[in-house]
Amino acid sequence: MRAHLGDRLVVGSPATGADRRDGEIVGLHHADGTPPYDVRWSDNGRVTLVFPGPDARLRHPENGPGGSPAPSGPDTAGTGADSESVGARPDGAAGAGDIGRRVAMERERQGLTRAETARRAKMAPDYLAYIEQRPADPSPATLISLADVLGTTAVALRGGDTGLPPGRGRALPNPRLEDLSPDECRARLSTHGVGRVAVSTADGPGVFPVNYEVVDDTIAFRTAPGSMPATAPGTDVAFEVDHVDETMSLGWSVLAVGPARIVTEPDALRRLAARAHTTPWAGGGRDTWVSIRPTRLTGRRISPADTGSGPDS
């Protein structure tokens, strides 16, 4: 029997042959995948060291609930469920899946190393690397454990909350709403990302999301000529960016108000292009840079009333 991280170990009943217990292999003790294994059991979420007996077999996640081996090919014909071919992941396998990208993003956002995250989640670092780098499908128990360490939810790691508006969670028992200083506002603006620009249009006020940069205390974004955001130059506009921690019911928002203009100077355009962290998500020919120099900068933060508030609250 040779396993890979992420395979499932299924233990059958000696009397009936029916599946009796199954778990996810989260740790290997030998490089060739031979037993024993660290297994996180589905029924209780505990991780134990297992030496599989004759009533145990491996199931690759891609094989589905029935546990049938993958279709036979030139390298697998005639192999059984305990063969080396079960769960094989060639070097040319696809890259990280959505779950892995979300796990890696949350881990980096928390400032945790992979080794520390794995230790807190009680899993092998190699298995966490596998989750982050390959199209893995971790068990619910593994996702719950990771979510607890990363301060999020298993639903969020699976992307189940994608498309839902933020702020649907419960409010804090004793929330504190406080103003941010100008320096705190600038620090949050400088994290870049996606913000919203509010402009006046012929049909009334409009608010548009844009990918933005902050260069020399100036907010800048790219847009397409003739688009609604491109009508901002020559007027005072409002620009807002925020962050919501759905799990902890924390959040902050920053509002910048000031005149907008189209950037035309070659040196300024080169500097903006060189320092851009991303391209506009909307794609297309968005080569018009619009800059906003704030004349008014305000912000607020929600945090627990009984704790101190740091820059990331």
Image: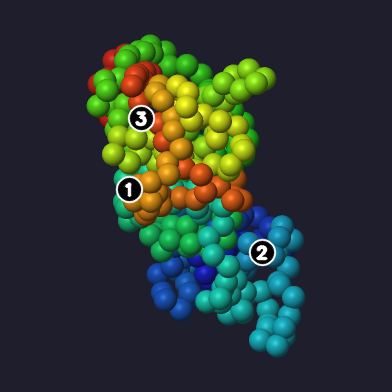
CB within 8 Å, label 2 to label 1: no
Residue at 68% across, 83% down: 76
Quarter-wise, where is residue 189 in the image? top left
Residue designated by label 1:
112
- In the image, residue 21 above or below residue 210: below
Of badges 2 and 1, nearer the viewer stands 1
Q: What amino acid type is highlighted by mark number 1?
A: Leu
Q: Tell which tag, 2 or 3, sits nearer the viewer.
A: 3
Please tell me whether mark 3 sits on a helix, a strand or a loop: loop
Under circle 1, the secondary element is loop
The residue identified by callout 2 is: 62
Q: Residue at x 47, y 23 (%)?
A: 235
Residue 293: which numbered mark, if any?
3
Q: Amino acid at mark 2?
A: Glu
Is 182 above or below relative to 116? Answer: above
Q: Position of residue 49 (x, y in %)?
A: 43, 60
Q: Residues within 10 Å of mark 3 (few under 14, many from 20)?
A: some
Disc 3/disc 1 C-alpha distance (Å): 35 Å
Going from the N terminus, do you reach mark 2 or mark 1 first? 2
